[in-house]
Image (cartoon, rainbow, N blue to C red):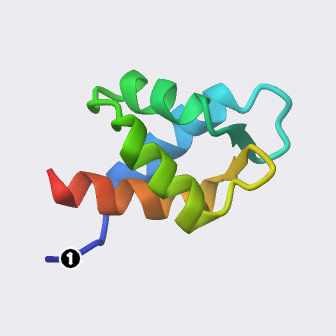
Amino acid sequence: MSHELSDEQVEKLKQAFDNFDKDGNGTITTDEVSNVMTSIGQQSPSEEELEEFIQQMGGEDGRVRFDQFLKFMAKFMNAQ
């Protein structure tokens, strides 16, 4: 199974991510990941999935970069 996202999906994710990146520093909080997903019509990840994401992709400082978020979303969306 491919973990690739279409250009359209990446653009949609970037727009949603940027909406929650209020200070424009290129990161969102790990708590906001669910909000971004909901804003694009995706089911929010379970607490377990979110914890796994934080451990695998970083977020140790409570912040997630777009590239980290994109990797998680590719995996999450292809798993559904």
Which residue is pictured at 18% across the width and 58% down the height?
Answer: 79
Position of 5 relative to 9 (above/below): below
* Mark 1 crowdedness (10 Å alpha carbons): few <14, some 14-19, many ≥20: few
In the shown orientation, is residue 30 left or right of residue 76? Answer: right
Q: Residue at x 35, y 38 (%)?
A: 45
At horizontal 49% and vertical 56% (from top left) the residue drawn is: 53
User: Which quadrant would residue 25 be assigned to in this image?
Assistant: top right
Q: Which residue is mark 1?
A: 2
Q: Height in image: 55 above or below 49?
A: below
Percent across and percent down for residue 14 are 54, 45
Tell me the residue at 28%/32% (across/down): 42
Residue 18's place in the image compared with 13, above or below, is: above
Q: Which of the two residues, 57 or 24, is positioned nearer the viewer here?
A: 57
67 relative position to 41: left or right: right
Question: Where is the N terminus found, in terms of image quarters?
Answer: bottom left
- Numbered label tally: 1
Q: Quadrant of residue 48?
A: top left
Residue 58 occupies which quadrant of the picture? bottom right
Q: Nearer the viewer, residue 29 or 8?
A: 29
The percent position of residue 3, horizontal first and vertical second, equals 28, 72
Percent from the top left, x then y, of residue 50?
A: 46, 44
Left-right relation of 15 to 22: left
The kind of residue on which mark 1 rests is Ser
Q: Residue placed farthest to the bottom in the image?
A: 1
Residue 77 vertical position relative to residue 22 in the rendered view, above or below: below
Q: Secondary structure at mark 1?
A: loop
